[in-house]
Image (tube, helix red, strand yellow):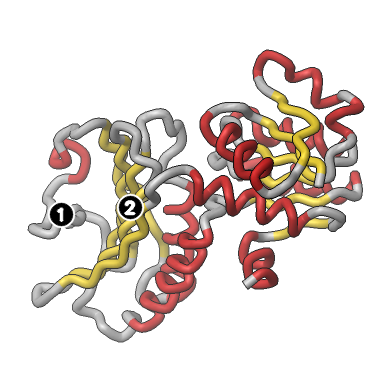
Amino acid sequence: MKLAIIGYGKMGKAVEKIARERGHEIVAVINVENTADIRSAEFRSADVAIEFTEPSQAAANIKAAAEEGVNVVCGTTGWYDAKAEVDEAVKAAGTALLAATNFSIGVYVFSRINRELARLMTRLSDYHPSLTETHHIHKLDYPSGTAVTLAEGIVESNGRIDGWKCNGCIHNNQDVMEVMGEVSEAGHSRDETPDNVLPVLAIREDEVPGTHTVAWESDIDTIEITHEAHSRRGFALGAVVAAEWLAGKKGIFSIDECLDAIL
C-alpha cells in the first residue's frame, strides 16, 4: 500500500517506521517546511494519508487531502468543532475519513470495559466516578480526546451520570489543591461537581505517552481501571492498521467500526 504522512513529529516518525516494517511504501511526507506538497502528484498517488499534526491544522489538512482524492486516517484531537464541515467535504470529494481520539487497540478494549463498568454501576448510588488523564507537556489540548471519549461512554452507559466537566489542567506537579479543591485519599476529585456530573482532570507531565484512569469511589472502597501507554508505538501501529482497513473505502468511519471488523 502507498501511504502519505502528514505531520513528521514523533508520531509521524513512529508511523513511518511501523508502515515500512509492514511492507508499505511512503510516497510523501508533509511537514511545516513543505505544506504545498499536499497538492503534489506524489501525495495524490497515496492510497491513504495518516495525519498527526496540531488541532489548528487538522481540518484544513483533511479537506486538502480529500480534494486530492486521498483517504485520511486522522489521529489529531482538539479540532472536532469542525468535524461536521470536514465530513461534508470528504463526502463531497468521494473519499474516506477515519478520525479517532486514540488508535491503540488496548485503549479500544479499555473503552469497552469502561462502558460496561459504567452500566454496572448505574444502581450503585454510593459510588461516584472520576476520570484522570495524564500526557506529556507537549500535548496542547485538554482533556485528551481519549478522555472525552471515555467520559462520553460513561454518560451514555450510566443512568445516574448526565454529563462531564473538566476541572482543570495540572502542569508538572502543580499543586492539585490549586486546581481541584478538596481531593480524596485515593487522589480523586471531591470538589463541588454535582453527583450527576463526571469530574475530569488533565495532567501534563514530562514525556508521559498517555495514562487514563477511571475510578468509582465510595466510602467503603474504590474500583479503578487504568490504561497506561508505554510508548507511542501502540498508537502508531493502530493508525497503520486503520489505514490498511480504510484503503479503497468511501465515507466517514469510526475506530469502533474498523476494530470491530478486524477483531
Q: Is residue 107 visible?
A: yes
Q: Nearer the viewer, residue 132 or 37?
A: 37
Query: Is 88 left or right of 129, judged from the image as shown?
Result: right
Q: Is residue 89 visible?
A: no
Task: Give the residue type at disc 1.
Answer: Gly
| Residue at image point 57% right, 45% down | 236
Q: Which mark is residue 200?
A: 2
| Residue at image point 47% right, 62% down | 106
Query: Is 186 left or right of 196, judged from the image as shown?
Result: left
The location of residue 162, given as percent across then percent down, is 41, 67
Viewer-side label of 1, 2: 1
Say which quarter of the image contains residue 128.
Answer: bottom left
* Badge 1 element: loop
Q: Which residue matches tag 1?
A: 187
Establish if 176 lies above or below 237. Answer: above
Establish if 246 lies above or below 51. Answer: below
Disc nearer the start of the sequence (1/2): 1
